Amino acid sequence: MKSKPEFMSKFEIWTEKYRPMNLSEVKGQDEIIDRLKAFIDSKTMPHLLFAGMQGTGKTTSFLAMAKELYGDGYRDNVLELNASDERGINIVRTSVKDFARTRPVSDDTPFKLIFLDEADALTKDAQHALRRMMEDYTSNVRFCLSCNYSSKIIPPIQSRCAIFRFQPIKKEVMKEVIKKIARNEKIDLDHTAMDYIYDASEGDLRKAENILQATTAIADKPSDSISGTVRVTVNEVREVVSFAEPTELYEILKLALSGKFKASKDKLSDVLVKYGLSGSDAISQFQKQIWNSEEFEDKLKVKLIKSCGEYDFRISEGSNEFIQINAFLADVVLMGTDSRFQNRYSNIENKIE
């Protein structure tokens, strides 16, 4: 296989450059990969439903499986569609139906594959049309649906599929992948920076790779003029990641619990501008900070996290982010005025685990 010209490799997106080419290279989903390999060996499989958060290997696993099944005949036997781009029933009646009604080209594999990425974006009518097609064309094709939330896929489709639930990538697995990329790209990545990348990615390997590439682009280079090694520290990672410092989030909560609404609101406004956070980002990071804090009693944690969930839902439904994030702070102030919590949190120190 010919290597790519140096100038092309230099500007390549790392998520594609380091995408696994076969199932054995897919990391973090061992049980799922073993079952997919068994399908390949037997040349038979049911319809598939891949469910899980983004960046956990759903699309990569499908592509690797399809290439192992068909080899050079991959392009003729596989149809890939992103359902979020074409949400209506027409995508099912045209693109999918035209491909499904024709016989497979491959002599070795008796079916073709149709991959619908982000299938949870399909309308209910489109899903019902898809369900009928899954029944009508089983002799020709197998469908593989990928989604973030299996609950958004109608039950009749779920019952016709083998469901694979992709878990967030574990820390040790993600570190292994990031270290490999760092070695190949001549990056000197310190342990603190690697931990920060993992925390910011929240189990999303694609996000972690993008953070590393973006961070490398702004890092001082080369740190070693002979080897060309680029040194990446946690400071560069912080510049790239829209991730507020835990101590700042804790200070906002402390002020609100102490009844200082205006001070907490002003501090929050500064943090939102400083890190470029959306209201949803801020709520998510507050939730994580509340969960990890050892200063809050469990009963208060329950109230705070319940409030986070309520306002995150309102924002996701289209409510004004600025109003909702301030309403969340108002809720926290009211919790702090509760006599059961007031003495404990009115003088709480500005510290974080």
Image (cartoon, helix red, strand yellow):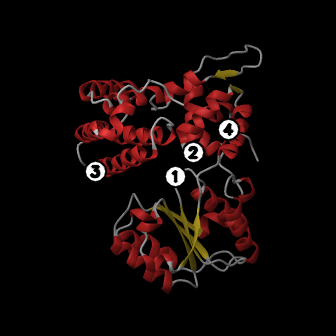
Say the numbered circle drawn on residue 54: 1
Residue position for label 4: 178
Evaluate if marks 1 and 2 touch, with contact meaning CB atoms under 8 Å apart: yes
Q: x and y percent of residue 281 in the render?
A: 39, 39
Q: Name the amino acid type tagged 4.
A: Ile
| Residue 72 visible to an observer of this rendering | no
CA distance for labels 3 and 4? 36 Å
Which sits in the foreground, 143 or 165? 165
Evaluate if marks 4 and 1 touch, with contact meaning CB atoms under 8 Å apart: no
Label 2 neighbour load within 10 Å: few <14, some 14-19, many 20+: some
Q: Secondary structure at mark 2?
A: helix
Which badge, 4 or 1, is on the more N-terminal residue?
A: 1
Residue position for label 3: 314
Which residue shows up at 33% across the image and 34% down it? 342
Evaluate if marks 3 and 4 touch, with contact meaning CB atoms under 8 Å apart: no
Which sits in the foreground, 266 or 116? 266
Give the residue at the far top of this rendering.
225
Q: Name the amino acid type tagged 3.
A: Arg
Q: Is residue 177 left or right of residue 97?
A: right
Q: From the viewer's perspective, is the residue at label 3 or at label 2 nearer? A: 3
CA distance for labels 1 and 2? 8 Å
Q: x and y percent of residue 125 in the render?
A: 33, 75
Q: From the viewer's perspective, is the residue at label 3 or at label 4 nearer? A: 3
Q: Is residue 352 above or below residue 105?
A: above
Q: Secondary structure at mark 1?
A: loop
Q: Name the amino acid type tagged 1.
A: Gln
Which badge, 1 or 3, is on the more N-terminal residue?
A: 1
Q: x and y percent of residue 236 in the render?
A: 55, 23
Number of dots carrying numbers: 4
| Residue 189 visible to an observer of this rendering | yes
Q: Is residue 207 left or right of residue 286?
A: right
